[in-house]
Structures are given as C-alpha cells and as structure tokens.
C-alpha cells in the first residue's frame, strides 16, 4: 500500500509541478490557478480563510499542502492527545493504520463547501462523481448537511454515503 501511495504522490507532484511552471500559479498572490488552467480548474478555489487552517501545514502522510487541499483535509485526534493532519480521507486511513496501537478519539474532516472542520462520522459523504479526488481515483467529499451533498451530486454525479462507506472506500 505504501509503495502505491508513493507512486500516486510522485505522479501528482510531477503533474502539479508541471502545472505550476506551465501556468504560472506562483505569479498570483492568492495562489489560485489562472482561470484557464485545465489541469486544476476543477479544484475548489482558494479563499482568504484557507490560509488560517489548523496545523500542520503539510499532510503528515504524503506531504501535500493542506491549505491547497483545505476542502478535503482531515484532522485525527488520538486518545493520548496527539494529532495527525492529512490532505484527504485516503491519507487519514493510512495514518490510522500506521498508528494502530493508538485509540482514535475523533476524526474531523473539512466540509467541502465551507472548509470548516466537522465530525467525519456525522458528515454526509459523496463518493465518486466528475470532480477528481485527492490522493485517490475515486473522490470522497464530506458535507455538513445532506442538502449540500445532494446539490453536489446533482451537479457533479457521485453517490451519497455514510462515513463507514467512505472509510472503506479509502482503504481500497
């Protein structure tokens, strides 16, 4: 599994680096891609509030910038008080497996729309659809309410699911 994640991360990083150099992402102060950037235009736009996400700045599994992926980030708190921040539910699943000796106290995930952290188990999840996922071929997005998830499905496809189903999909 680690080798597969390393390959996926390497491919993503190469594509992202190419996108930055080819489309001048670094030229804009807000970090948002140019309007005509086809390789990343389906990612949620960065907002001023994104710069104020909780620590850590980088995913503790793959190293990706959690501010860039604020709409899919996860914060895991273990019973001993330690935390692990990841860019996605896929990396969160790996982090929990890597810390199997620790009891998970809570898993918070970003609401896709507001980017605020919500309880992952209470979230309404959308699996699949036309929006590319983070660290996965199959997207998994969390919403604070079912209406938001239903709007997303209507516009982008996918299916509504509970946390358990999204967690199992992240394991694959």
Image (cartoon, rainbow, N blue to C red):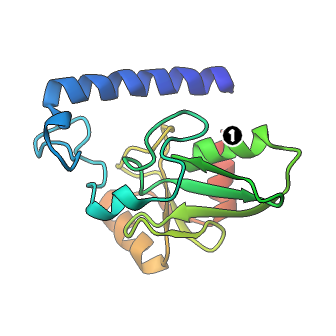
Residue 65 x/y as whole percent: 43, 41
Residue 16 position by quadrant: top left
At horizontal 54% and vertical 48% (from top left) the residue drawn is 56
Say if 98 sits above or below 149 in the image. above
Residue that mark 1 sits on: 94
Q: Considering depth in this image, is 49 or 5 the residue closer to the camera?
A: 49
Is disc 1 surrounded by few (<14), some (14 to 19) or many (20+) residues within 10 Å? some
Helix, strand or loop at label 1? It is: helix
Residue 74 left/right relative to 72: right
At horizontal 70% and vertical 42% (from top left) the residue drawn is 95
At horizontal 51% and vertical 59% (from top left) the residue drawn is 54
Q: Considering depth in this image, is 18 or 54 the residue closer to the camera?
A: 54
Residue 11 left/right relative to 140: left
Residue farthest toward the right in the current orientation of the protein: 101
Residue 136 x/y as whole percent: 51, 38
Residue 118 left/right relative to 45: right
Q: Quadrant of the N terminus?
A: top right
Q: Quadrant of the C terminus?
A: top right
Q: Considering depth in this image, is 48 or 105 the residue closer to the camera?
A: 48
Residue 96 x/y as whole percent: 74, 46
Residue farthest toward the left in the current orientation of the protein: 36
């Amino acid at each position: 599994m680690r080798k597969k994640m390393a390959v996926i991360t390497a491919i993503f990083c190469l594509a992202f680096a190419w996108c930055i150099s080819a489309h001048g992402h670094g030229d804009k102060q807000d970090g948002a891609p140019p309007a005509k950037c086809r390789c990343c235009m389906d990612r949620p736009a960065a907002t001023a509030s994104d710069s104020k996400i909780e620590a850590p700045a980088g995913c503790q599994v793959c190293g990706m910038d959690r501010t860039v992926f604020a709409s899919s980030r996860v914060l895991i708190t273990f019973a001993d008080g330690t935390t692990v921040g990841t860019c996605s539910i896929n990396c969160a699943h790996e982090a929990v497996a890597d810390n199997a000796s620790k009891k998970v106290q809570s898993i918070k995930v970003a609401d896709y729309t507001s980017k605020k952290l919500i309880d992952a188990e209470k979230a309404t999840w959308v699996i699949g659809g036309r929006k590319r996922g983070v660290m996965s071929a199959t997207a998994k997005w969390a919403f604070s309410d079912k209406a938001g998830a239903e709007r997303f499905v209507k516009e982008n496809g996918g299916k509504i699911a509970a946390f358990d189903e999204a967690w199992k999909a992240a394991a694959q």
